[in-house]
Amino acid sequence: MTVSATLRVALPVPLPRLFDYLPPPGLDASAVAVGARLRVPFGQREVCGLVVGHGQAEPGVELRAALAAPDAAPLLQGELLASLRWLAGYLHAPLGEVLAAALPAALRRGEPLPDIIRYGWVLNEAGRTALAAMRAGKPKALAMLLAETRAEDWLDETSPGWRAPLRPLRERGLVERVKAGSESTFFVKGDSDPAFDPAFSPNAEQQLAIDAIRSANGFAPFLLDGVTGSGKTEVYLQAIANCLARGRQALVLVPEIGLTPQALTRFRARLGVPVHALHSGLNDNERAATWLAAASGQARVIVGTRSAVFVPLPEAGLIVVDEEHDGSYKQFDGIRYHARDFAIVRARALAVPVLLGSATPSLETLHNARCGRYELLRLRQRAGAARPPQVRVLDVRKRPLQAGLSEESLAAIRAALDAGGQVLVFRNRRGYAPVLLCHDCGWSAHCPRCSTPERPTAMTVHAHGKRLQCHHCGHRRPSPPACPDCASLALQPQGNGTERIEAELQAHFDDVPVIRIDRGSTGQRDGLQKHFDALGNQPGILIGTQMLAKGHDLGNLVLVVVVGIDEGLFSADFRSGEKLAQLLIQVAGRAGRAERPGTVLLQTHHPEHPLLQTLVNGGYHVFADGELALREAAGFPPFAHLALLRAEAKQAEHPLQFLQLAKTLLEGSGIEVHGPLPAPMPRRAGYVRSQLLLAAPARAALHAALDAAVPALYAAPDARRVRWSLDVDPLDLY
């Protein structure tokens, strides 16, 4: 009896197992490498998985044949494949879903590999001959640039609109398209050391940090703990330049897509090599091309958001995680990984340094540095002539407010604008107002898909009062013309969002641009950067959410007004104090980053609150000392390790039954099990939600308990009646 060779395949399905298939017709199993994609039939549909091993068919078992093997070489291999296997084990997630999450969408779907050859343009012999006789204009200016080969991506970056003047040059046969080498310059000044900036003279602390990173040999985790404006990016650039000089690749993670254009511009201007972007603002083909360019070694510097942590790095030399404290590095659905933590895991496997930078390090990272697990590099002073901003707490109790702004704040804004400066008004709530309320009977607009009788969820008012939207499930509806309960016309938006503040400031300051920056106003590609470009250095006002609190360098910003911080002072979430402290320090750090001094006004009805007083009088590290002591006493991270098991269904009893089963499986395992309890938001998008919180003082004990219980949860009949997920190291309890 002939035994057939088989392929073990990890499929992107929520099942904790592998699947065996025969090789595609006409192909031997040994010809399909581990890490290559395989298109297979799965039930009534076709899916694309990844080969993770080879085997032999069991006697009497009939297997289906795969449909096609699209790759001649494996996409996932070596360190990256091993690290992803580790991640699947750590998250207790199906390997197929983890491997699929690591691939760009186009490759995940099984599409052909995109062309990653870099093309450029250069004058041919006829073009060089005709150059001197050309009339002045855009075609001649472009022709002068093309006296040497210029890559298309370089032209996109340095000469927007270059394709229009290229057309007459092509029609006259004066240029030709050629392959551009991977080192085709992005740097036109001709310096022998592009990373050298004659205006940059490192202070003692910067030099110590640069020297420490350069001298690192093998895996070395660093925390670059520098106040806002202290020149952390310059330290990154010097470290990356050293990495490139050694012929290695560098990966830079940034928390938000809005930071990517700014980082790309600065890095491309200094490093002298193509800098590749990887973020959700690119189309599927662009993301796949960048991923493959990294896999081939062609991409030497990759700058990207959370998912960029999955790029292959065959010649890795350095990983940088900017604003490492930021919550956007955590994936909150699907595979719930943390990009910062996985970057550290990869750096260890690759034996390269990893540099975590922040002005407000997460308490976990700060604790690791203080325990000696990471080397701490401090930057305590702002770079150059910049000085820390002056911070004032404004008591707005019993004060008249206009769209949440006090008269003192409005006067300060006027003074800053008259002096030629720019102002940031920070309100971490988008929309026009948080609530639509009937002034006569007290009715308010609630989301029908997320509210419960005990816990109503307000719909946010948008479009100057014309539209209601739930920020949890996305449900939208027009605002009612009259109160549905009493038919009164006295419907009033209550509270202030960025849209309402924008309208108020436009009415007050009609002589300067007033620009709102939030998720609603920056939806287009490079939308955030376009707003910054429109403002330039002229006097004006920016109104925005936390998108503006992260890493943006606005040299003419002299005043920051923070509105509506009080709701963050009394949250039940044990991380709320840390999050608010980080947000306030970060947004305050946008002011006074150049020569002009900056001022920060914190409006509050609770001026004596301990958190505010600690931040103003002691700073972030004094707050962190006190918060770490409280966490240790209460047994919270980083002194304990958590996992959150969530379940939801249309019927309330099903999640509770499933979680009760989980609790039974976990009892006696030596870990604390809290619940099952309704989630802090007990209903969302029509689903009733419950959860089980698991805690252990040692990470090993938590994972041992999960290793024993999770397979049984997948097999349980109750699991089919709910949508459930396991979040290891949760950032919030929602």
Image (tube, helix red, strand yellow):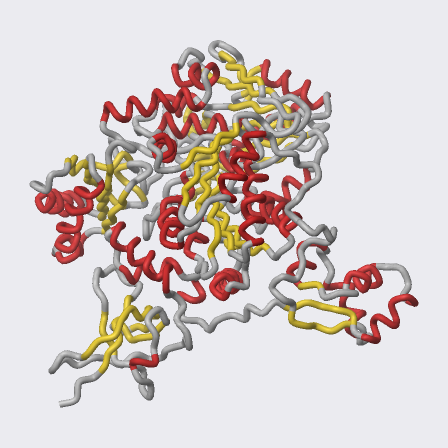
Q: In which quarter of the image is residue 685?
A: top left
Q: Position of residue 697 (x, y in %)?
A: 20, 34
Can you say which quadrant of the picture contains the C terminus?
Answer: top left
* 599 displayed left or right of 451: right
Question: Residue at point 44% right, 61% down?
Answer: 104
The tally of labels here is 0
In the rendered image, which quarter contains the N terminus?
Answer: bottom left
Is residue 305 depicted above or below 56 in this figure?
above
Nearest the camera: 325 or 438? 325
Which residue is located at x 17 percent, y 85 percent? 3
Q: Residue at x 17, y 81 (%)?
A: 62
Percent across and percent down for residue 352 are: 43, 50
Q: Which of 539 and 199 is in front in this view?
A: 199
- Is 709 placed above or below 467 here? below
Where does the image place residue 479, in percent across and percent down from the top left? Answer: 46, 37
| Image height of 238 relative to 284, above or below | above
Q: Residue furthest bottom?
A: 1
Q: Can residue 584 be seen in this view?
A: yes
**Residue 416 in the image, given as x and y percentages of width and height:** 67, 21
Occupied quadrant, residue 488:
top left
Is 183 placed left or right of 725 in the picture? right
Which residue appears at 32% of the width and 48% of the height? 336
Q: In this view, does 256 lie to the left or right of 368?
A: right
Is residue 480 in view? no
